[in-house]
Image (spheres, rainbow, N blue to C red):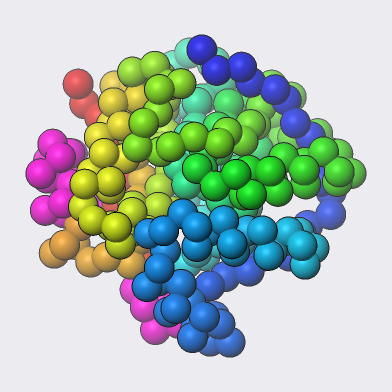
Amino acid sequence: MLRLHRLWISLRQPRTQYFGTDAGTRGKGESLRNSMGDRKTWDNIYSKNSHNGFSHFDWFFGYEQLKGRLLSLISEIALGEHTGSPIRVLDLGCGTSDVGVGLFRDSPLPLLISCVDNSAPAIHAMRKSLLTETPIVPAHQDSQLEYLESDVTQLHGFLSGSVSLVLDKGTSDSLLRSGREQAQKMVLEALRVLKKGGKLVQFTDEDPDARLPFLEKLGAQPNVTFHDLALNDGVTYYAYIVTRVA
């Protein structure tokens, strides 16, 4: 079983960088796209970012753009579980994204949030930021947050059927740059750890003609819905929601 430690988050809002979305970083974002399947690429990015003063790094978009959708999903899951216990959330390939922090801060329902990444510099940067910033109380006193250095394709620390919500914001896209096998392993692990009625949410710029067959081959169909998200820098993004029914 994973040990969860309550961490208080900073009142000060660290700045957030978006690569591949803002016009000013379009060239840099495209360069990153071509090498983002390599962990060394991300280690280098997070190391440089921390040396220049901590800021959240988000691919596509950050928490504020997803806040309403994510909090609505959490409310829906809570109604389905009918337990009142904290809802287990797993953020795969979290990097230094502000999604986990935002949910911890804003969710009126109690959450147990595990943010997982195989980049040591990213996890170190997030843990350090949580310890050095001015603390605040989360929206629910029983909410907890942790950052774990771990391989998202081998979630050995998570029991099968133990998680209510799994988030994948561009992580499968990164893994696909190194071949389909690693991305497939990650999705299969995400489906394994989901509770019955739990949801895997993928945020990606991959269109349904490509993503739906990918998920279907992994046994996710027919329990997949998808939604167009707002255009960002001329690119359409999608949210694919897979619900585990058995």
Res. 93 in view: yes
Residue 208, compared with residue 202, is above or below; it is below
**159 displayed left or right of 74:** left
Residue 77 picture location, percent across and down = 42, 30
Residue 243 picture location, percent across and down = 27, 35
The image quadrant of residue 154 is top left
The boundaries of the magenta stretch are 212-236
Residue 64, compared with residue 198, is above or below; it is below
Residue 13, compared with residue 244, is above or below; it is below
**147 displayed left or right of 13:** left
- Please say whether residue 137 is one of the residues in the magenta stretch: no
Res. 170 in view: no
Residue placed most toward the observer, 155 or 90? 155
Q: Where the C terminus falls, by quadrant?
A: top left
Residue placed most toward the observer, 134 or 222? 134
Residue at 68%, 65% (x, y): give it. Answer: 48
Residue at 53%, 72% (x, y): give it. Answer: 19
Residue placed most toward the observer, 186 or 78? 186
Residue 86 picture location, percent across and down = 56, 20
Residue at 41%, 58% (x, y): give it. Answer: 38
- Please say whether residue 214 is one of the residues in the magenta stretch: yes
Q: How many marks?
A: 0
Residue at 55%, 36% (x, y): give it. Answer: 149
Residue 182 picture location, percent across and down = 28, 46
View extreme (front): residue: 40
**238 displayed left or right of 133:** left
